[in-house]
Amino acid sequence: MPRITGPSIAEHVASQEAAVVDAARRLFSERGVAAVSLGDIAAEVGLRRTSLYRYFPTKAHILERWFDLEMDPLVDRSREVVAGAAPAAETLKAWLDVQLDFFTDGAHRALMEAAAASEEMPPDVVEHFGRRHRELYATLDGVLLSGGAETAEVRRVRALMIAGLVRSAAELVSGGEDDADVRRELHRGAAAIAGL
């Protein structure tokens, strides 16, 4: 029977999952995703490969957990920003700044590079990524409603367009463009899409 290293089974599982994700991050950045096996990750953590499968059946599922560890605080912060009493235009700017800071952060870029280099993702992981992105974009709902997007479909389309602007802005900043210039244009373009 495996030894439980935490005060409870849930805490033990969380600790093991965090150790696996940390090891995978290191190994992926050192060698690349394709060159790292689940056995390599298990050895790095001190687990048998069969024990690792209990936590993560594939590297894609490790990426999924890593994604959640990044996404949870981003969704929480995005909700906080839109819950304030600021006017819709100011709320949108604050929301955009949170997103751009996240997308240009080195840890998030490492995750995106690892996901892009990963072999084909299982459908459940792809669906999970999509669901979490929809959860993030839904935080903009009230702002978009303020801008006149009365139907859920129009709000969804506008949120996706704004998300595309954020991704493009992050690429520009990461590529060396001036952060202040990019933010100013991101704010302007997103406000136009939002109707603010």
Image (spheres, rainbow, N blue to C red):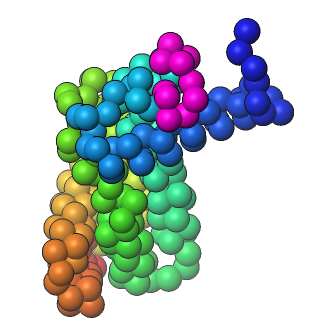
Residue occupying image coordinates x 18% and y 68%: 171
15 lies left or right of 181 = right
Q: Magenta residues? A: 42-51
Residue 115 visible in this rendered orientation of the protein:
no
Displayed quadrant of residue 121: top left
User: What secondary structure is the stretch in magenta mostly built from?
Assistant: helix
Q: How many marks?
A: 0
- For this rendering, which residue is in front, 187 or 27? 27
Residue 7 higher or lower than 98, as above or below: above
Residue 33 higher or lower than 190, as above or below: above
Residue occupying image coordinates x 40% and y 84%: 90
Residue occupying image coordinates x 57% and y 40%: 19
Residue 147, x across and y down, in percent: 30, 72
Residue 156, x across and y down, in percent: 26, 52
Residue 11 higher or lower than 139, as above or below: above
Displayed quadrant of residue 58: top left
Q: Residue furthest top?
A: 1
Residue 38, x across and y down, in percent: 39, 25
Residue 78 higher or lower than 33, as above or below: below
Is residue 45 magenta-colored?
Answer: yes
Q: Residue furthest right?
A: 7
Q: Quadrant of the C terminus?
A: bottom left
Residue 115, x across and y down, in percent: 27, 43
